[in-house]
């Protein structure tokens, strides 16, 4: 990539470091204690994580933990907070995460052989959860998920309604069959008890 091509990435990186959020606050405290600039700390941490995801053992587990633990923790905090803005933010992340996981499930047999797959997946999930204005999950939801959902919402609602109705009918039929077969089991148990009693009386008489 040329210097002109890298300029937008540098601007995004600088924007992230200058925004006020939990991550940048932590980086600021780390910079004060160590004397190392935030930019160098982030580049070093990303480089080490990237190398481990490429060459380390358990890259899939580490990647999935990164994509699940942090968002799950802050989703619980969002539920407990009075604000609804953070609820929407994390709901959007989980919708995009679910769509991505579904696509990954069907393409995993091919992606498994891609040497840098888990490193790119980790970067993608970090982009989706990043506490910045150019958050990936919001971008993907607005540009991909929402238009498709609105286009097919009525059809999906009808399918869900039909499946729900069929499930209820199946449950009612099973319940009705269970009630109808109960007298048969009762009669069988009574006959078994009577036969056993007669047999015991005969043995006692002998």
Image: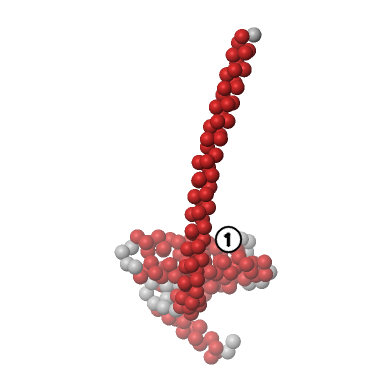
Instruction: Tell me residue 68's x, y (percent).
Output: 50, 62
94 or 54, which is in the foreground?
94
Instruction: Tell me residue 125's x, y (percent).
Output: 52, 70
Taking the spot 40% from the left edge, 60% from the top edge, the residue there is 76
Taking the spot 43% from the left edge, 81% from the top edge, the residue there is 15
Which residue ends up furthest to the left in the rendered image?
Answer: 82
Name the quarter where the N terminus is drawn: bottom right
- Identify whether 197 is placed above or below 101: above
Residue 107 appears anywhere in the view: yes
Tally the numbered discs.
1
123 or 105, which is in the foreground?
105
Residue 128 appears anywhere in the view: no
Residue matched to label 1: 61
Instruction: Tell me residue 168's x, y (percent).
Output: 49, 54
Name the quarter where the C terminus is drawn: top right
Mark 1 crowd level (few <14, some 14–19, many ≥20, 10 Å Cα): few
Instruction: Tell me residue 60's x, y (percent).
Output: 60, 63
Q: Which type of secondary structure does the marked residue at label 1 adopt?
A: helix
């Amino acid at each position: 990539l040329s210097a002109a091509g890298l300029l937008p990435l540098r601007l995004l990186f600088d924007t992230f470091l200058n925004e006020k959020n939990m991550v940048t606050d932590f980086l600021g405290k780390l910079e004060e204690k160590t004397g190392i600039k935030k930019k160098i700390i982030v580049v070093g941490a990303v480089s080490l994580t990237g190398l481990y995801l490429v060459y380390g053992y358990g890259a899939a587990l580490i990647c999935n933990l990164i994509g699940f633990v942090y968002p799950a923790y802050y989703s619980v905090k969002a539920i407990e907070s009075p604000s609804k803005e953070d609820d929407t933010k994390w709901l959007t992340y989980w919708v995009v995460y679910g769509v991505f996981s579904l696509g990954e499930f069907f393409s995993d047999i091919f992606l498994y052989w891609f040497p840098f797959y888990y490193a790119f997946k980790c970067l993608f999930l970090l982009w989706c959860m990043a506490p910045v204005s150019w958050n990936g999950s919001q971008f993907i939801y607005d540009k991909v998920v929402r238009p498709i959902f609105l286009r097919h919402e009525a059809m999906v609602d009808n399918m869900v309604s039909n499946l729900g109705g069929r499930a209820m009918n199946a449950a009612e039929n099973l319940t009705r069959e269970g009630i109808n077969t109960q007298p048969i089991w009762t009669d069988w148990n009574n006959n078994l008890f009577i036969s056993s009693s007669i047999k015991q009386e005969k043995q006692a008489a002998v």
